[in-house]
Amino acid sequence: MAVRCWGLIGGLLFANVAMAQPTDSIKVARLLEAAKTLPADSSRALFFAERFIGTSYVAGTLDNRNPDENLVVCLDRLDCTTFVETVAALVLCDKQHSTSYASFKKNLTTVRYRNGERNGYLSRLHYFSDWIADNERKGIVREYTRTISGYTWPVTLNFMSRHPDSYPALKNAPELVEQLKQMEAPWHSYTMPYIPKGWLNRQPEELPIVNGSILALTTTIDGLDVTHVGFACWIGGELHLLHASSQKGKVILDPLTLYEYQKNKKTHTGVRVIAIL
């Protein structure tokens, strides 16, 4: 997404076809086996997300030394985007009744890339509005922001093409920047739905956000839509964010309510809410 963590969809550090640690496959299998015992009505997304609490935060986990856009899997180092994508891929595996690592990698590819096809840097879904739209078309997620709030904000997504030096793959690559501009064009003057941050101290009855929903934190930064993502978690009638925190350096269930987390951030406007189906 263009800002990692949400703006850019990150990047990482190895150089194999599926850049993964040996322990990743073991962890995936254990998580999926454990999920088999969950009640049918429990949130799989929240279950998987909670299992990553304490995992180290590493920024830009998809962009560093990955010029060939290999599939990056690194479950012991996450940024906010790879955290959300990893959980979404696990939920898909659970839905498919599969515990195989091959299925996990296939689902991660499907979630991360346009039309589920990995074909270079620009096939990755860099802006979160684009990520939502593409994954809705694939039947993986559904945004329900508009069912809660009628608020919208006009957005033109062009941050990446206007700041190519901030992105290793775009720096000194004018041909890629021109292709990116074409991909950004449909998002000119996009009407983005959001729930105002002032609403986020409401009770669950007034703010029907389901546990385990993806929360995308919206922004006024020119050229961007979303700057951070995580998962909804209600505690004692208050909404909290379960996320990969750059400030804390790890995945945390934030002790601040989401209302408190956002209220003094001048560029934050609120959230979008997306369910993993």
Image: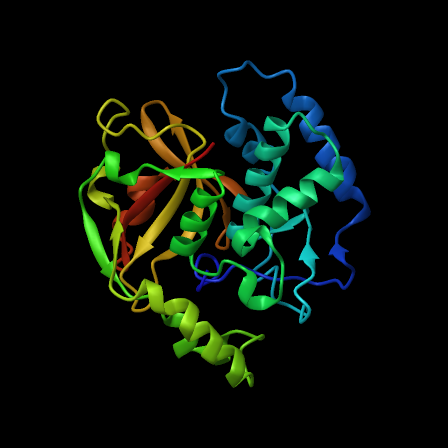
In this rendering, does residue 267 appear at all?
Answer: yes
Q: Is residue 63 left or right of residue 198?
A: right
Q: Is residue 64 above or below residue 143?
A: below
Give how far across and how far down residue 113 sits, in percent.
56, 55
From the viewer's side, name the closer residue of 56 and 186.
186
The residue that appears at 51% across and 85% down in the rendered structure is 174
Location of residue 124 by image quarter = bottom right
In this rendering, does residue 250 appear at all?
Answer: no
The residue that appears at 48% across and 54% down in the rendered structure is 247
Location of residue 200 by image quarter = top left
Q: Is residue 98 above or below residue 271?
A: above
Q: Is residue 214 left or right of residue 103?
A: left
From the viewer's side, name the closer residue of 14 and 197.
14
Give how far across and how far down residue 151 sits, in percent.
18, 46
Give how far across and how far down residue 99 sits, in percent.
72, 30
Q: Is residue 185 left or right of residue 78?
A: left
From the viewer's side, name the closer residue of 69 and 49.
69
The residue that appears at 51% across and 41% down in the rendered structure is 252
